[in-house]
Image (spheres, grey):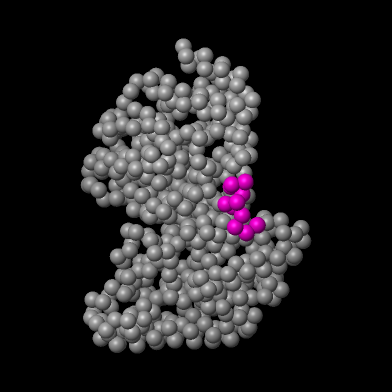
Amino acid sequence: MEGSNNNNNNKNKNNESGILIVVEGIDGSGKSTQIHLVDRWLRSKGYDVFFTEWNSSETVREITSKGKKKARLTPMTFSLLHSTDFADRYEKNIYPLLRAGYIVLADRYIYTALARDTVRGCDQSWVRNMYSYARKPDLVFYFRIPVEIAVTRIISGRPKLKHYEAGMDLGLSKDEYESYKIFQGRIVDEYESMVSDENFIVIDGTLDIEKQQNTVRRNVLRTLKLKNQIRGNIARVSQLETNTDE
Amino acid sequence: MNKMISRKLTKNKDYSTTKKESNNKIKFINHSGIKYLKDIEINGSFIVIEGPDASGRSTQIQKITEKLEADGHAVVNAGLKRSDLISQGIIEAKRNFQVGRRTMALYYAADFADQLENKIVPALKAGFIVISDRYIYTLIARSSVRGINKNWLHQLHGFAIKPDLIFYLNVDPFNLIHRVFKKNKSLDYYESGSDLGLSADIFDSFIKYQLLLKKEFTMMQKKYGLIDVDGNKSIEDIYHNIQTKISGYLDQNKKNETLFR
């Protein structure tokens, strides 16, 4: 039993027949819209799809939001609670569903934690270790967008930013909007530093939604083909292909 | 004020007051620690008591606290599962059996971090003697026997600050089980490791589980400098053993301090 986790992970890799697709990017980069469209598309083609969102575990969310409301989370507890949330979803859903052959779509994955926690002042190698058990995605789409555009998208229609969302705990600025901009800018820097090492597929988030979706679907198709050849399931892929060619 | 000073004495001839102060810097288990706290100065002492349930930890802590306070030291008690931010969630998660092992490990780590930053560190900064009823070693041991990778666990808890003294109440599991029965009349589900499926017989499961934990502590003893205390002895004997070491430590600190004056 002892120290068996890492070995297990390696052993199980071959058994994980599912596909893990991730979208990353700052708030307002349009990633959620894109993953939603992928979700609809794959479901309409009869694929088994599971969608999971950052910070959404029922068990953990309540505590996290309580702490957030009281604004008493430190960078460490903030990081650990999000990591707990992720672990809960990973152990309950992501991992077993991948084993079962599902396509798992994740709106934010470990890269969000790596970017945010590092900006908040946690040691990056410590954060990396915390998420080291998580499977590498088959595809990571990173939605690149100038901070100003993303910030405008978020701020318009929102009278007040939330404390942690604006990065107010970092003391970057007394003004919430100013703080938010600086905070998001730093997160972008962290994302950009991961692009090549983590094999992000960069999507230009300023383009038309349809154009972005086309690029995304083309990449998803390629991955499905690669995997499906092994599963002998090409029929469904060619069906998908005819649809995107239109 | 702490161990580093005596070591520094032999190494460094020029010990001005500024040097002394820099030696009070907070010390983490992993060198990286909590980056944004790395400049904090610690003026108090940090004592940890480890040991299984019914090993007599709370009795000892009570006696030590009384003695220290009688001697004029200000004491703060801390422990696992006491942070009001998260502990309710842990209790619920456990009751509902709906949380995975890694999730549980992270939950506990979050709860611990909350206590460390909001209670332990401020108290040490202010010059209190902090006595912690259990520490990261219990968290590591529990998760490790549940199959979570050791290296991952040690790194995860590496942000904890280094205690000055760590006592481990080492009790023979057969002895322990009698103490548990004296205390509760029944065996706790988790303290018997029932979730591990070691044995259908809860008595056997308890013994096996406690032996596994004991093994984990033995492995950690050297790495973290745990002081093994024979917990099979009487309350008075154990207390005498611990008390002597604490007094010795505090006296040494005092001596070092006056040396610098």
Q: Do we see residue A220 in this rendering? A: yes
Q: Nearer the viewer, residue A23 or B168?
A: A23
Q: At x 29% / y 81%, what residue is drawn?
A: B12
Q: Position of residue A135 (x, y in %)?
A: 53, 42
The percent coordinates of residue A132 (x first, y second) are 49, 49
Quadrant of the image for the C terminus of chain B?
bottom left
Q: In terms of depth relative to the viewer, which is nearer, A84 or A117? A: A117
- How many numbered markers are drawn? 0
Up the image or down, B107 lies above or below A223; here it is below
State the image coordinates of residue A150 (x, y, percent, origin top left).
30, 32
Residue beneath the point at 43% across and 70% down: B162
Residue B147 vs residue B65, the one in the foreground: B147
Q: Residue furthest top?
A: A246
Residue at left 70%, top 65%?
Answer: B208
Q: Is residue A111 left or right of residue B261?
A: right
- Quadrant in which residue A180 is drawn: top left
Query: Which segment did they paint magenta?
Result: A1-11
Tell me what residue is drawn at x 38 percent, y 69 percent: B27
